[in-house]
Amino acid sequence: SSPAGPGAVGGGCRIVGARFIREVRIGNGVEIDGASILENATLCDGARVGVDVKAYDLIAAEGSVIDNGSIREHAACWR
């Protein structure tokens, strides 16, 4: 099951070196490695976010990958 409410973090996540995370719902097993900004987002189970990613108003589907240096605004990311 997914976490409830804004700012929730699921089980088994790995968050390393992220600079700014606000109002992000993080599912189980999500990996965030050095993201610059994550704001108003939902990261579904197993999603991965790379170094220097800037994402606003984002939905990342289960198992999706947002590569290093990506900029996403008002987007949905799929596998």
Image (cartoon, rainbow, N blue to C red):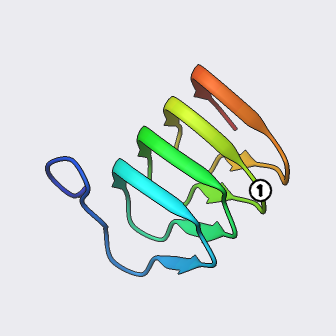
How many numbered markers are drawn? 1
Q: Amino acid at mark 1?
A: Asp
Please state, as top left, top right, bottom left or bottom right, where the C terminus lies in the image.
Answer: top right
Instruction: Name the residue: 75% across, 60% down.
Output: 50
* Viewer-closest of 37 and 7: 37
Judge from the rendering whether residue 42 lies leftward or rightward of residue 49; answer left or right. left
Judge from the rendering whether residue 52 lies leftward or rightward of residue 36; answer left or right. right
**x, y percentage for residue 74?**
54, 18
Judge from the rendering whether residue 59 lies leftward or rightward of residue 79; answer left or right. left
Q: Quadrant of residue 47?
A: bottom right
Instruction: Name the residue: 51% across, 65% down.
Output: 30
* Viewer-closest of 46 and 58: 58
Q: Quadrant of residue 40?
A: top left
Please state, as top left, top right, bottom left or bottom right, where the N terminus lies in the image.
Answer: bottom left
Structural crowding at the residue carrying mark 1, measured as other residues with C-alpha within 10 Å and reported as few (<14), some (14–19) or many (≥20)? some
Instruction: Name the residue: 46% across, 76% down.
Output: 13
The residue lying furthest to the left in this view is 5
**x, y percentage for residue 54?**
67, 43
**x, y percentage for residue 21?**
45, 57
Instruction: Name the residue: 39% across, 67% down.
Output: 28
Q: Is residue 50 above or below residue 22?
A: below
Give the residue at mark 1. 52
The residue lying furthest to the top in this view is 74
Secondary element at tag 1: loop
Q: Is residue 16 above or below residue 58?
A: below
* Viewer-closest of 3 and 70: 70
**x, y percentage for residue 75?**
59, 21
